[in-house]
Amino acid sequence: MLALFLFLAATPLLADMPEGDARRGQLAFGPCRTCHYPEKVVGHNNGPSLWNIFNKKVGSQAGFDYYSDALKNADFVWTPALMDIWLADPQKFLPGNMMMSLGIPDAQDRADVIEYLKTFSE
């Protein structure tokens, strides 16, 4: 847990993120659909549903039984800032997770994806 704290302390704040655009984010999210769906009515795929993901405890989507131990044991909630860090490099953010993506290196693309995911919230 100390390693996660030190990692987060060295990362940019939400204020440092570019402004996202949900329409661009929909396009940037395309490769993510291999494993994830954000729409409420679709549910889980190879990865958990991303419906209403923000402010939800990591590794806790009901009905998804394939979380790695790293995600099951993590103790934080998804925020746009944490999602930005996760999307930049999932393995660096939380080693041992089963995310198949190497991440989204471009900060604008990440901001756009996050803005798109925000549209799938109650």
Image (cartoon, rainbow, N blue to C red):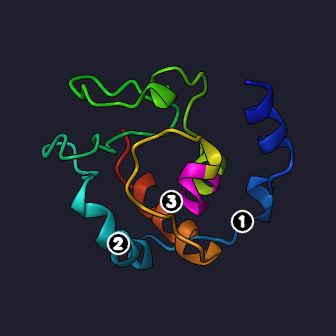
Amino acid type, residue under disc 1 in the picture: Met
- Image mark for residue 26: 2
Query: Mark 3: which secondary structure?
Result: helix
Q: Residue furthest front?
A: 96
- Verify CB contact (< 8 Å) between mark 3 and mark 1: yes
- Which quarter shows the C terminus? top left
CA distance separating discs 3 and 1: 11 Å
Identified at 58% across, 41% down, the residue is 95
Disc on the earlier residue, 3 or 2:
2
Range drawn in magenta: 85-91
- Which quarter shows the N terminus? top right
CA distance separating discs 1 and 2: 18 Å
- Image mark for residue 83: none
Q: Which residue is mark 3?
A: 114
Q: Residues within 10 Å of mark 1 (few under 14, many from 20)?
A: some
Percent from the top left, x then y, of residue 67?
35, 30
- The answer to whether 30 is drawn above or below residue 61 in the figure is below
- The answer to whether 52 is drawn above or below residue 81 in the figure is above
Amino acid type, residue under disc 3 in the picture: Ile
- Image mark for residue 17: 1
Q: Is residue 86 visible?
A: no
